[in-house]
Structures are given as C-alpha cells and as structure tokens.
Image (tube, rainbow, N blue to C red):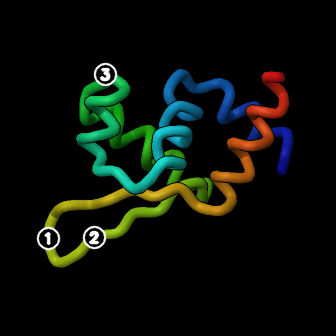
Amino acid sequence: MGLELLNWIKDGKYRIRTLELLSFGSLLSSELANKLNVNRASMSRILGALKERDLVYSVSERSRTVTYTITRKGVELLKTVKSYKQ
C-alpha cells in the first residue's frame, strides 16, 4: 500500500467512512449520501475518486440504478488505516 494513497484516503472527510459503510455490503449512491448526510453530487464525486483509484467498483443492471461495492484493494487500505489508528 503506497504512502501517497494512504495520505489521500485520510485527507478526505468522507473517504474512509464510505469504505467502512461499503465493507458491510453494497449500497446505492443515494443510500451512502443519506447515511453520511451529504448531498448526492458530493457523494458522486467521492465515489468517482474512490473508483478512479480502484477502491470501489460499480454494478449496473439494466437500469439507471448503480450499486457500489468495495474492492479487495479498498478492504486492504481500510485495514491499513485502522491499524494506524490503534
């Protein structure tokens, strides 16, 4: 796990929390926005940045509904972050 990625994830207010929520299961962008009390546009930017770094991926099934899931890389990063907190 690169130090640059670790610093990036810790720098954002909602990045770690988003990964934590997704570690319990897949969620819609709107569900994440509601749980984190952020607007949908902000949540979309957060998810886009996480997706760009291969920390989450999205699944769309024949509709406009997109579900987000944490990747293996995202799980490992979350474990690393939590180990630094202790």
| Residue 47 place in picture, x, y as percent | 43, 46
Q: Amino acid at mark 1?
A: Ser
Q: Say if mark 2 contacts mark 1, CB within 8 Å.
A: yes
Mark nearer the N terminus (3 vs 1): 3
Give the labeled residue for mark 2: 60
| Residue 24 place in picture, x, y as percent | 48, 48
Q: Where is the C terminus found, in terms of image quarters?
A: top right
Give the labeled residue for mark 3: 37
Residue under the point 31% across and 24% down: 38
Mark nearer the N terminus (2 vs 3): 3
Q: Residues within 10 Å of mark 1 (few under 14, many from 20)?
A: few
Relative placement, left or right, of 43 versus 82 is left
Q: Amino acid at mark 2?
A: Ser
- Residue 34 sits in which quadrant? top left
- Residue 41 sits in which quadrant? top left
| Residue 60 place in picture, x, y as percent | 27, 70
Q: Amino acid at mark 3?
A: Asn
Q: Separation of disc 3 and disc 1 at Cα?
A: 25 Å
Residue under the point 31% across and 22% down: 37
Q: Separation of disc 2 and disc 3 at Cα?
A: 24 Å
| Residue 80 place in picture, x, y as percent | 80, 41
Identify the element where label 3 is drawn. loop
Relative placement, left or right, of 73 versus 14 is right
Q: Separation of disc 2 and disc 1 at Cα?
A: 7 Å
Give the labeled residue for mark 1: 63
